[in-house]
Image: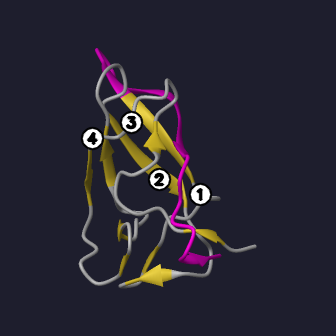
Amino acid sequence: MAAGFQCGIVGLTDSVNSPATAVVSINIRVKTATGFVGLLSDIVQFPGPSIVGNWVLPALRCSVMGIPVINGSSAGIAYMPSITGLSPTGPMRINMPDPRASGS
């Protein structure tokens, strides 16, 4: 089933509902009205207890530059630093995917 694409940091939160502050992406080709389409390789930055997040389940049929895209049904994990490395804090949530561009 098709779901709206995640674009930039709009509507992206971590497990404690902190909004994303930045996204590092290599996508410079595909853009919608709300920003560049998110990719599986994107690294998301959060304030507070969760520092970074990455995607683990992308869209299955859509890709940009050979990399799967992130849509409303994708899943990601937010992490915080600890003495032994990075510990997961919970899932990343897509609250507002782009309603005018979608894929599966």
Amino acid identity at mark 1: Ser
The residue tagged with tag 2: helix, strand or loop?
strand
Q: Which residue is mark 2?
A: 55
The residue singled out by tag 3 in the image is 19
Q: Is residue 31 left or right of residue 57?
A: left
Q: Are marks 2 and 3 in contact (CB under 8 Å)?
A: no
The residue labelled by disc 4 is: 21
Q: Give yes or no for contact between labels 1 and 2 (Cβ–Cβ under 8 Å).
A: yes
* N-terminal label among 3 and 1: 3
Compare residues 26 and 103 and report the one nearer the observer: 103
In the image, 1 versus 10, the foreground residue is 10
Residue type indicated by callout 4:
Thr
Mark with earlier residue (4, 2): 4
Q: Which residues are magenta?
A: 80-104
> Which of the image's four quarters has the C terminus?
bottom right
**Mark 3 neighbour class, 10 Å CA radius: few under 14, some 14 to 19, many 20 or more:** some
Residue type at numbered disc 2: Trp
